[in-house]
Image (cartoon, rainbow, N blue to C red):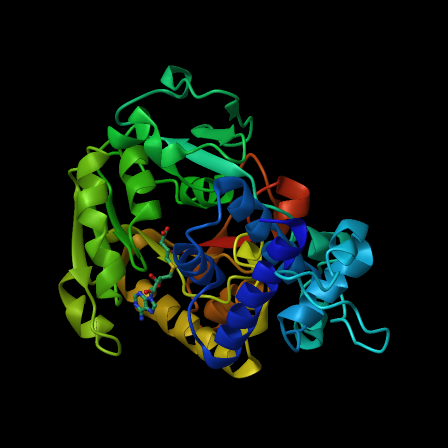
Amino acid sequence: MTPPARVQAAIDLLDLIIAAAREGGAAADTIIARGFAARRYAGSKDRRAVRNLVYDAIRLCGELPRDGRAAMLALAQRLPGVAAAFDGSTYGPPAINPNEKAAVPGVAPAWLVTALAASGLGEAEQEALLERAPLDIRVNRLLAARDDIAIEGAQPLAFAPDALRLPPDTSVDKHPAYDSGLIEVQDAGSQLVTLACGVAPGMRVIDLCAGAGGKTLALAAAMANQGDLLATDTDRGRLQRLPPRAERAGVTIARTLLLNPGHEAEMLADETARADVVLIDAPCSGTGTWRRNPEARWRLTADRLTKLEATQARLLDLAATLVRPGGAVVYVVCSLLDAEGADQAAAFLERHPGWQAAAIDLPAGTRHGAGMRLTPASDSTDGFFVAMLRTT
Ligand SMILES: C[S@@+](CC[C@H](N)C(=O)[O-])C[C@H]1O[C@@H](n2cnc3c(N)ncnc32)[C@H](O)[C@@H]1O
């Protein structure tokens, strides 16, 4: 493909991504994969170049752009090579009309920038939310030690004991260590918030929002595969992916329970007041993972955020019923909005006399409200809030 043809292909994909953001359609990654499947003539270099153009344009535009061309025009204002591609050639975009409006660069929609600033994130912290994320893996200490893993360019992270940071384009899923369950792709921040749970062999632990089990597997490793680990979620598709992953990782203590939304408490009645630790990796806006899904900031609405906050509070109250006296609820969100993090923890403590915030001992992060915060700018991880809430 010529450089102009690559730019036009990126514009076409951006049109689809923008429409999907407006209408609640597929994620950008899915749209890009489908787009390439339909463009068999694009080689691997073309695909990488088009993908980079698409993501650079998404990262640059804070508000949802009018269309793909407006987004690419914003990028053209920064990159002369992209501007030169608007040459009107056969497969390229038509030449730039001097009156055409480019999308306005920015971190996020204005209401979200205000909410991030009110949550204590300065400009540099906000901008770092949109940098390219590194590629981290967790070494599964049930089957291997970090030193056993030989992957070219892998760097051990000083602040996360099981983490290796890999060169960006490493094909992890093609590595033999992946097939045999020795490694999992997992951001170092995710690894740290699991570490914050302080679980140990023999404990009874519930991973209330387990999804496909990213943190369940890390919990099982920290428990040395001893104890009882219940992984629950309301999403059948995600939870179904957990058992095969557990098998590959040699995890034998995890059992799963699919919850019926609205009936979680009844379904967990047998678990009342028994757990040493309940991890709530709560559904959230994901502002801390914009590095991976930058178009998520175009999809979030104030209404959606309010609904998420209500679910988070409900899950906190549910988790409190599952913990034994002296046990802990560990509340985690991959969001840096206080409404989902520090404010939720504070509101929980107000609603539940007899509960206290416990100190979390982590090798990274900063104290924030009743818990700790990890951010891309300060910790080079995804953004997280984590609090440990203990009952007496
Ligand atoms: C942040 S994701 C969890 C990611 C997962 N723990 C991991 O490490 O890969 C939040 C999860 O909460 C689940 N969820 C949403 N509402 C829930 C509810 N009422 N009860 C339990 N899980 C819920 C979602 O289906 C989603 O899988």
Q: Image check: 311 left or right of 371? A: left
Residue at the spot 31% in from the left edge and 57% down from the top edge:
211
Vertical comparison of 23 with 371: above or below: below
In this view, which residue lies farthest toward the bottom? 303
Residue 108, by quadrant, is: bottom right
Q: Choose between 273 and 300: the one closer to the eye.
A: 300
Residue 370 visible somewhere in the drawing: no
Identified at 39% across, 40% down, the residue is 198
Q: Residue at x 76, y 52 (%)?
A: 124
Q: Residue 176 in the image: x percent, y percent?
A: 29, 25
State the image coordinates of residue 312 (x, y, percent, origin top left): 42, 70
How many dots with numbers?
0
The residue lying toward the viewer, choosing from 196 and 22, is 22
On the image, which quarter does residue 288 sit in?
bottom right
Query: Residue 325's spot in the image, x, y percent?
Result: 29, 55
Q: Is residue 72 visible?
A: yes
Which of the pair 22/15 is nearer the observer?
15
Tell me what residue is drawn at x 68 percent, y 67 percent. 71
Indicate left or right for 347 with 205 as reference. Answer: right
Q: Residue furthest right?
A: 98
Please provide percent x and percent y for residue 46.
55, 46
Left or right of 110? Residue 80 is: right
Q: In terms of image quadrants, where is residue 54?
A: bottom right
